[in-house]
Image: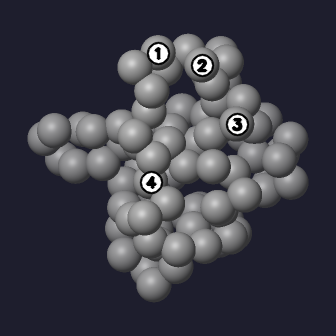
Amino acid sequence: MVVRSADGKRLGTVAAAGKNYLHLRTGLISKRVYWVKYPDIREIRGGEIILRGGRELLLEPPADEQSDGPLTHTKPIYAANGLA
């Protein structure tokens, strides 16, 4: 699933979903991972996630990525956070 900024720029794709954050993968080669807080998601439209802002919402994950709890398939997480 593609993730876009509020102005429509492609930021990356969903890698996984945690308890409090959406895990986003960017780049074609480097595949860096960022986290996005669920409240920073404005909407899901046409199979794409639209954020409330831009790159400033992308957070570096902590060294211990397990701090976001077990990663889950994305669909139940969206529903649990009122995004489905």
Of the residues shown, which amino acid type is indicated by label 4?
Answer: Leu
Are the residues flagged by discs 2 and 1 in contact, CB closer than 8 Å?
A: yes
Q: Residues within 10 Å of mark 4 (few under 14, many from 20)?
A: some
The C terminus is located in which quarter? Answer: bottom right
Dot 4 or dot 1: first in sequence order is 4
Dot 4 or dot 3: first in sequence order is 3
Residue position for label 3:
20
* Residue drawn at x 75%, y 37% as measured from the top left: 77
Q: Residues within 10 Å of mark 1 (few under 14, many from 20)?
A: few
- Distance from label 2 to label 4 (Cα)? 17 Å
* Residue drawn at x 44%, y 33% as measured from the top left: 61
- Distance from label 4 to label 1 (Cα)? 17 Å
Residue position for label 4:
58
Q: Does residue 43 appear to the left or right of 58 in the view shown?
A: right
Residue position for label 2:
67
Of the residues shown, which amino acid type is indicated by label 1?
Answer: Asp
Q: Which of the two residues, 69 or 46, is positioned nearer the viewer here?
A: 69
